[in-house]
Image: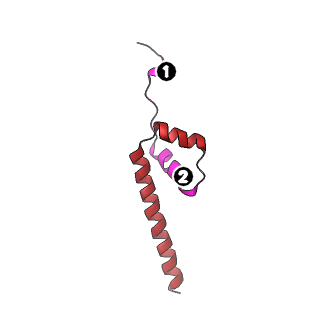
Amino acid sequence: MSTDSNNQPPKKHGTWAVVKSALAAFVGVQSAKNRERDFEHGNPLAFIIAGFIGTITFIVLVALVVGYVTSR
């Protein structure tokens, strides 16, 4: 058996890493290094789901704030 590190599969992103990357990209502060890491080792479906959940959460929060402000 070879202990060569080149034969190991790339490390997958955990849930927290996906959420952190999606939030950073959503705000626009994602570093180039992290973006490259996400594209090389990340699962696209995980980032799509995180982006969708983030977008829906943002829309709901804006709607709640607008509803609160206009009801006063």
> Magenta stretch: residue 23 in it?
yes
Q: Secondary structure at mark 1?
A: helix
Q: Is residue 51 left or right of residue 72?
A: left
Identified by mark 2, the residue type is: Ala
**Amino acid on which the number 1 mark rests in the picture:** Ser
Q: Quadrant of the N terminus?
A: top left
Residue 29 spot, x, y in % from top left? 60, 52
Disc 1: which residue: 5
Q: CA distance from mark 1 to mark 2?
A: 31 Å
Find the magenta span and give its range: 1-28
Residue at figure coordinates x 53%, y 87% from the top left: 72
How many residues crowd mark 2 within 10 Å: few (<14), some (14–19), many (20+)? some
Task: State the mark number for residue 25.
Answer: 2
Could you tell me which secondary element the residue under label 2 belongs to? helix
Label whose residue precedes the other's in the sequence (1 or 2): 1
Q: Are marks 1 and 2 in contact (CB under 8 Å)?
A: no
